[in-house]
């Protein structure tokens, strides 16, 4: 199993709106692709960031499934996120393998 982890540092003034949008729009759109079996939202509670940091983790069956998601769906979904929040929500992505 693979975890696709998206860590997002969100400016404090938009954090409430961002989290609501993630729960009601973005994450449902990601899950509707059929590529992931589950997701979780985590709040990072350590570190010295300005703003609030979240990690969104999506679970899929294989690297091939993730590659398909990244090719077919991710560009449009990421573009929508950038257009809505710009540099007020900076994301970076990591891939983890469950052992």
Image (spheres, grey):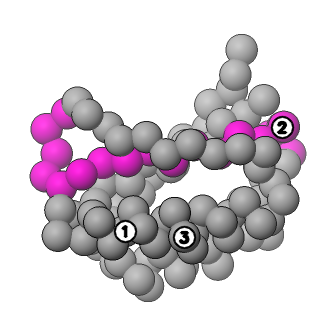
Label 3 residue SS: helix
User: For residue 62, what is the image quadrant?
Assistant: top right
* Rendering coords of residue 97 (x, y %): 69, 26
In 3D space, how far apart are the residues under numbered discs 1 and 2 (Cα atoms)? 29 Å
Quadrant that contains the N terminus: top right
Residue drawn at 57 percent across, 73 percent down: 25
Q: Which residue is mark 2?
A: 62
Q: Which residue is mark 3?
A: 24
**Rendered position, 2 above or below 11:** above
Q: Residues within 10 Å of mark 3 (few under 14, many from 20)?
A: few
Q: Is residue 89 above or below residue 63?
A: below
Q: Position of residue 56 (x, y in %)?
A: 51, 48
Q: Is residue 52 magenta?
A: yes
Residue for point 81% across, 54% down: 35
Q: Nearer the viewer, mark 3 or mark 2?
A: 3
Q: Which mark, by number, is residue 49?
A: none
Q: Secondary structure at mark 1?
A: helix
Q: Would residue 45 appear left or right of 32 to someone viewing this image? A: left
Question: In the rendering, at what x and y percent does residue 67 appear?
Answer: 78, 52
**Residue 74, quarter of the rendered image:** bottom right
Which residue is found at the position 66% from the left and 36% from the top?
3
Distance from Cα at disc 3 to Cα at disc 2: 26 Å
User: Disc 1 designates what residue?
Assistant: 18
Which region of the structure is painted magenta? 47-64
């Amino acid at each position: 199993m693979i975890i696709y982890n998206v860590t997002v540092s969100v400016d404090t003034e938009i954090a409430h709106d961002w989290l609501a949008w993630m729960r009601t729009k973005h994450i449902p759109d990601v899950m509707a692709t059929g590529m992931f079996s589950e997701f979780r939202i985590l709040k990072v509670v350590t570190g010295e960031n300005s703003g609030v940091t979240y990690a969104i983790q999506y679970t899929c069956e294989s690297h091939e499934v993730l590659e398909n998601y990244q090719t077919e769906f991710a560009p449009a979904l990421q573009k929508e996120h950038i257009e809505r929040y710009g540099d007020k929500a900076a994301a970076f992505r990591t891939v983890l393998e469950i052992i």
